[in-house]
Image (cartoon, rainbow, N blue to C red):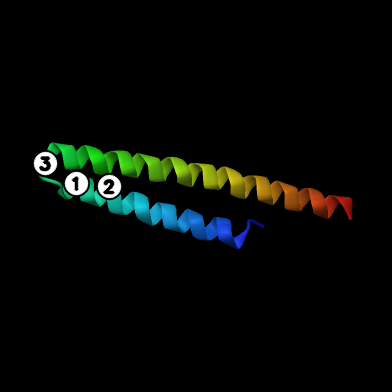
C-alpha cells in the first residue's frame, strides 16, 4: 500500500496539471500559453515520479509481507 502522503501529492499534481492545461488553452498570449504548457508538463513529470514512488512503496510493502 502506498503512503497516504504520496497519494495526496499525486492528486495535487494531477489537479495542478489539469489547471495549467486549462489555463494554457484559455491564454490569449503565446507567452502565457507556453508558460502554462511548461507548468503542465512539469506537473505531469512530477506525477509520474510520484507514481514510481508509490510503486516502490507497494513493492517494499509486499516484500515485508513475504519476510514475516
Q: Which residue is mark 2?
A: 21
Q: Quadrant of residue 31?
A: top left
Foreground mark, 3 or 1, reads: 3
Residue at 40% in and 45% down: 43
Q: Which residue is mark 3?
A: 29
Tell whether label 2 touches label 1 (CB within 8 Å).
yes
Image coordinates of residue 34 in percent, x first then y, are: 22, 37
Disc on the earlier residue, 3 or 2? 2
Q: Which residue is mark 1?
A: 25
> How much space separates mark 3 and mark 2, taking CA atoms?
14 Å
Tell whether label 1 touches label 3 (CB within 8 Å).
no
Residue at 19% in and 41% down: 33
Residue 61, label in figure: none
Residue at 36% in and 39% down: 41
> How much space separates mark 1 and mark 2, taking CA atoms?
6 Å
Q: How many marks?
A: 3
Residue at 27% in and 47% down: 21
Q: Residue furthest left?
A: 28
Q: Is residue 58 left or right of residue 25?
A: right
Foreground mark, 3 or 2, reads: 3
Where is the C terminus found, in terms of image quarters?
Answer: bottom right
Image coordinates of residue 9 in percent, x first then y, are: 50, 56
Q: Is residue 60 left or right of residue 15?
A: right
- Disc 1 secondary structure class: helix
Where is the N terminus found, in terms of image quarters?
Answer: bottom right
- Disc 3 secondary structure class: loop
- Disc 2 secondary structure class: helix
Image coordinates of residue 50 in percent, x first then y, are: 53, 47
Q: Residue furthest right?
A: 68
Callout 1 crowding tier (Cα within 10 Å): few <14, some 14–19, many ≥20: few
Amino acid at each position: 500500500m502506498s503512503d497516504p502522503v504520496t497519494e495526496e501529492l499525486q492528486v495535487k499534481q494531477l489537479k495542478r496539471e489539469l489547471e495549467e492545461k486549462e489555463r494554457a488553452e484559455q491564454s490569449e498570449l503565446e507567452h502565457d500559453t507556453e508558460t502554462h504548457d511548461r507548468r503542465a508538463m512539469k506537473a505531469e513529470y512530477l506525477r509520474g515520479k510520484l507514481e514510481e514512488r508509490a510503486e516502490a512503496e507497494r513493492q517494499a510493502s509486499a516484500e515485508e509481507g513475504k519476510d514475516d
